[in-house]
Amino acid sequence: MAKNTSRFICSDCGYESLKWLGRCPGCGKWNSLTEEVLTPRQSLNAKVRATAKPIALTEISQMQMHRYSSGIGEFDRVLGGGMVPGSIVLLGGDPGIGKSTLLLQVADRIGRLGRKVLYLSGEESAGQIKLRASRLNIDNPNIYFLNDQNIDCLDTYLAELSPDLVIIDSIQTVYSDNLSSVPGSVSQLRECTAKITDMAKKSERVFFVVGHVTKDGALAGPKVLEHMVDVVIYFEGEKHFPFRLLRGVKNRFGATDEIGLLEMSGLGLREVTDPSSVFLSCKDPTVSGSAVVAAFEGSRPLLIEIQALVAPGNPGYARRMASGIDQNRLSLIIAVLEKRRGINLSACDVYLKVTGGVFLRDPAIDLGIAAAILSSYRERPLPLDMVYLGELALSGEIRAVPFLDARLKEIERLGYKNAAVPAGSKCDEAGCRPLALMGVKNLDYFIEMVMGG
Ligand code: TYD
Ligand code: MG
């Protein structure tokens, strides 16, 4: 009989070791190795039979790539235009962010088209799912609920029901009998994902798999999970704000880094069709420390307000707090302002906030951040009808930004009259648009022209 063996596996990178180690040699993380008992698969001993057949590229059906809509436009956008049959999509996000709600709403839209949906939940009971469905006014006979966490039985249920869409909520709660380790362990995650991937590739079904995230915001389990699936989407947002961002980080069928914007309401998630307008609060000409930027997220620009507060602090213990951008980026911009402009912020606390609870990674918002900090520091409001675009170099120069035309169009659409852009920027319709462009070479020029020296 095959013997059980034990391995120590890193929960972060999947590194395997025969003995316990305090520090993972694979990723360098401390205390991440946990013991798992592995039972060898029966099939390893049995004679392996090759059942697959090579197919010529020309014979592969084009039908396999025909996408269909999830019924939620913003979700389709992140999926690369819709759901691809035979694909597996991993949806990660914090608990309570709305993953189950989103997938139940997608299930309803798909069910309404006469397609069957199987909702496998290891986290919630049938009653809880029904409660959520009633709250969302969903009463769809094409949605089937299944409460069996054993992934080895899924094949049987799929053959019986023949659904077009399968939702697994969540990957951390399902297990395979091939392994004796507990659900959610690294080896179970890998085994179950491999099984689901196998089922997806052999059929025309779409699989949505929910994954929990660690406190650092990454999907719990080794990175290899992300490699095994076709699409990885993160569902982000601040709990205290209604806005939720779908962010594509991997997509085998479309552009990555695409974003979709949704709003959590009393009746589930709603699409936000005009994202820019929701991030701009009402303007007060006497308020300092507020600047509007045009951030490019995914394939579209978003106009968002950035607020800064520079307050007196203790020298040597000055606080820097950023919400919505990386803290290190705030420190870097403050360092450039101090070194290049001689502004002494060492005795000041600096707080920065992006409205709406979204997280921005676009470097083109640097100029807007610097403008907001300067405005609060000097207690001088910035012009209300201006938008700031430009990446700040360590030298204090303002660097060019990509997709300038798309950003300018959005700025115009929302009625702004002026835009500060990097000097020398080339745009297609220069001179014929109603927007007045101000070319900014460096911080000195910016302060001179916009803040009056
Ligand atoms: P849920 O989908 O259960 O989150 P996840 O699966 O990511 O853990 O969403 C739970 C939250 O959403 C909960 O705090 C309640 C809120 N919610 C609404 O605000 N409106 C709604 O219509 C629904 C169904 C949930
Ligand atoms: Mg859930």
Image (cartoon, grey):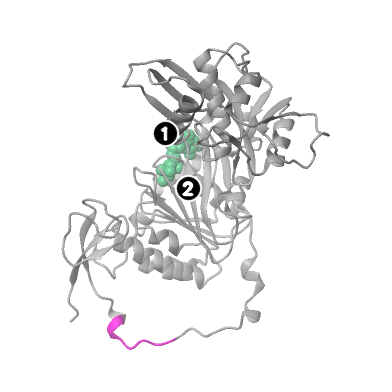
Q: Position of residue 8 (x, y in %)?
A: 21, 62
Query: Relative to 368, is 33 above or below?
Result: below
Please check the rendered image and state whether residue 107 is part of the magenta-colored stretch, yes or no.
no
For marks 1 and 2, the one nearer the N-term is: 2
Query: Relative to 324, is 230 above or below?
Result: below
Residue 164 appearing in the image? yes
Looking at the rendering, which quadrant does residue 314 occupy? top left
Residue drawn where x is 45% and y is 31% of the image:
330
Nearer to the camera, 247 or 178: 247
Q: Which mark is residue 234?
A: 2
Residue drawn where x is 36% and y is 53% of the image:
122
Residue located beneath label 1 in the image: 327
Say which of marks 1 and 2 sits in front: 1
Per the image, label 1 sits on a secondary structure element best described as: helix
User: What range of the chain is rendered magenta?
Assistant: 44-50
Is residue 204 shown left or right of residue 37? Answer: right
Nearer to the camera, 270 or 255: 255
Q: Quadrant of the C terminus?
A: top right
Of the residues shown, which amino acid type is indicated by label 2?
Tyr
Predominant SS along the magenta part: loop
Looking at the rendering, which quadrant does residue 193 occupy? bottom left
Is residue 104 shown left or right of residue 169? Answer: right
Say whether marks 1 and 2 touch (CB < 8 Å): no
